[in-house]
Amino acid sequence: MSIVAVAVSPSWYLILSGVLFSIGVLGLLVRRNPLVMFMCVELMLNAVNLTFVTFAREFGHLGGQAAVLFVLTVAAAEVVVGLAILVSVLRLRPGATADDISSLKG
Amino acid sequence: MAEALTNTVWFLPLAPLVGFLVLVFGFDKVFDSRNSQKNVPEKRIGWLASGFVITAFVFAVLQFVALLSLDGHDRAVTKTLYSWIPVGSLKVDISFLVDPLSVTMILFITGVGALIHIYAVYYMHGDKDYRRFFSYLNLFVFSMIILVMADNLLLSFLGWEGVGVCSYFLISFWFDKRENASAGSKAFITNRVGDFGFMLAIFFTFQAFGSLGWQDISHGASSATASTVSIIVLLLMLGAAGKSAQIPLQVWLPNAMAGPTPVSALIHAATMVTAGVYLLVRVSPLLEASYDWVPQVIMWIGLVTALVAALSAMAQTDIKRVLAYSTISQLGFMFVAIGAGAPVAAIFHMITHAFFKALLFLGAGSVTHAMDGEQDINKMGGLSKHLRYTTPLFLVGWLAISGVPPFSGFWSKDEILAGVYNNNRFAYVLLLLAAGVTGFYMTRLVLKVFFGKPNYTHTPHESGKGILLPLYGLAALAIVAGILNLPFSKDLLVLEHWLEPALEGGFVKHLSFGGGTQWVLGILSIIVGGLAMFLAFRIYHSNRFGSIQKVVEHQFFYKAWHIDQALTSFVGGKGNRMFQKAADFDTKVVDGTVMGVASNTKKLGGVVRLFQTGKIRSYALWVTLGAVALLVYFLIRAL
Amino acid sequence: METAVFIVAAIITVLSAFGVILAKNPVHSVLMLMATLFAIAVLFVAQDAHFLAAVQIIVYAGAIVVLFLFVVMLLGVDLAENLRVEPIGGQRPLAIGATVATAVLTILLIIVAASDSSKPESGDLAGITQETGNTGVANLGRVIFTDYVWAFEIIAALLTIGVIGAVLLTRRAKQQEVEEEVVEKEGGQL
């Protein structure tokens, strides 16, 4: 019996999304390029989206899919504003990493 | 009609307040369009200030008329301007209580105030701070009106502090002399001791009655516990003793004579110093509800003050200091009246005293004017030849304060004496003695100043009409004010009937003897007064009884029983160490606690600050660790 | 069939996700991100979320990733940091530890939860319109415009705010540049 014949259970999707989320976290914590860090945030958001869709099918409810749409929109807005901030910051300090932008502390 | 008239009550404080603002901000230049570039002539300033006080007097009369049109028991109108402090159950309004007591007070405050203002217009002629003087004077009248018109303790306290600060300003008016400045400080600091009592009394009152309104206090007095009420009364008495210069807080008043003479007359004789008496009369129902010994304390404090101050007055050589000690003594009489359950007599004496003491002070001002500022009575004498108008006016004041019938002082003093006789025979004898001493030192003063050989070389000049005019008014009042409350028949007790609704439920003891005893008491006081005056006449005019003169002018009396020195050495010596300990407690324990909390918070903040590196990745790490902790928690729960 | 799709898509997802965080060149990261998004879109399709899959590709891959690319190009591709050095002490071991812990704990939690037979009934999600044949775009649209219409409106407002914010942020920077240029010119004349 090949593995292909085994039915996919929702847990698989959830585990995949957990792994994807953890990869995003790792990237966010390790990388210093603000652009890449943004992408890691996108990875984490997508992991969550995947969870939403899985549960939507599991419970036979479209609320999960609607939530994905909203997360997507928020992600888009976040990227737009975040990148705008990034652009203006990097214009003043070219080549800055996330660690360099640390003057807003007590 | 009464409603419409009492609505104008707000013009009472408004008039002097506007006067004050106009003088401070120099709008008076607006009134003088022709010379707007030059300094305004000083008379214009003076009359402007006087005008505002006269306006206030007119409105005071309107309030009086309004109350007259009401029935006896409706004569208590509360007018609220706005809610001042609405905090939880504490509701304090800016509101005035128009009742017989407050109207009586404002009538003589604004009346005497207006006369003294007019006097000051001429008296202060040529002073470089003419405008400042009148702005203070107007502010004082404003504060005094707030003090007596307020319908609650807190607003009254506002006026109380207002008159205190004006008193300070005016005592040290000529502050370029060091002793004047320190006299002002002394008055202010001594008053703070009393104010501390007043403030505590406010707190206790709120706790006991849940309100600070006079009427709530009056109505609630009978249902409150005697101990609480006694504490409140004793604390208020401390405040009153400070403001009205009663022992042991009397030390500031003689020094307060450093201020200009109109100030001495207005603030330190006629109005402000009577605020304590007013306060105690106002809370008369509390006296009724407190322990029996509480009014006795008030009476004995007044009595001791009256005697000690009178015995100090007879040895003084400064004309204004004689009058200052006399004022303390007379205020003591009023306290005695309150403590003996004769508040009407206290108010009566307050009014007559305001007239004759203001008259005496203004007369003394006229004398010092003539003497080119000399105040030592040993350097005067024979002034009656030169001061043809001032002398008879001063003599009127002398007769009034000495208790010679039919002058006003006799009637009010006799009423107090009758009230004390009704209460305590021993106290009566002592008070009669004090009354006799009053006659003695006043006669001494008059003889030394106006008669005998002159001890000066120049020719004194009589004061101008502007100075004499208010003196005529006050002299007339000092002569006739006795008709306010004549004891011959019940219908003649006008003041008593008038004040009756305001003193309802108050500490009033009716005389337990008939008219015959009153006649005897009256004649007795005439005899004692007459003897004292005769003795003074023999000593200071006929130069007899030199040994008695030595006794009465002894250093002990001259230094006012060394009370001032005793206080000074205590505060400077033993007391200082005690105060230092209290101060140490404050700096070490109280401040230490506060600062300790602050510095520990700072230290904690310093530790927490280490987490805030400004590096977003380390923040994210902390968030992740938090998420891990949450996951562990969920896992444990799921298992 | 679904199993095969899942396995292939999952492998692509994980690998390209690692590619995102490991690529030195940000452009490569962006491309890897696009691959991840495509794989997730496939997983959406596998779970009958056809509309979301389309949106995923159009909005994410089409708009957001292109935006990323633009910014990368705008700021220069030489923004690669030296991954051998870690400026914050203890950050990397802690990060790896925390990440592994997150992953392991999540997987454990899912396994524990899946073994729990008391699965909530769909009816337990009370108060929300039940859609039976839940694959249709029409049904999704109906849910969004009925049950979630309020959230939808707020999202619309959020997007508007985002646009305004972005315009404002970048415009201010331009003004600054203009001012700097003016200063430079004046300096040159002097």
Image: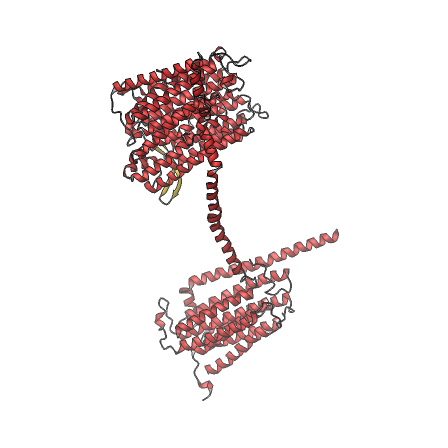
Q: What is the x, y in percent for residue C48?
A: 44, 76
Please state which of residues B413 and B100 is positioned toward the viewer in this rendering. Answer: B413
Tell me: B614 left or right of B6.
Answer: right
Colour mapping used in the image? secondary structure
Q: Is residue C155 above or below residue B110?
A: below
Q: What is the x, y in percent for residue A58?
A: 40, 75
- Dividing the picture into quadrants, the one containing residue B314 is top left
Residue visible at 34% across and 42% down in the picture: B207
Q: Is residue C64 above or below residue B130?
A: below
Q: Is residue C73 above or below residue B453?
A: below
Residue visible at 49% across and 51% down in the picture: B595
Looking at the image, which residue sits at the far front? Answer: B547
Please state which of residues B425 and B351 is positioned toward the viewer in this rendering. Answer: B425
Looking at the image, which residue sits at the far top? Answer: B385
Look at the image and tell me in which quarter the C terminus of chain B lies: bottom left
Residue B338 seen in the figure: yes
Q: What is the x, y in percent for residue B144?
A: 42, 30
Q: Is residue B628 above or below residue B315?
A: below
Q: What is the x, y in percent for residue C176?
A: 64, 55
Tell me: B610 left or right of A51.
Answer: right
Please state which of residues B286 and B93 is positioned toward the viewer in this rendering. Answer: B286
Look at the image and tell me in which quarter the N terminus of chain B lies: top left
Residue B21 seen in the figure: no
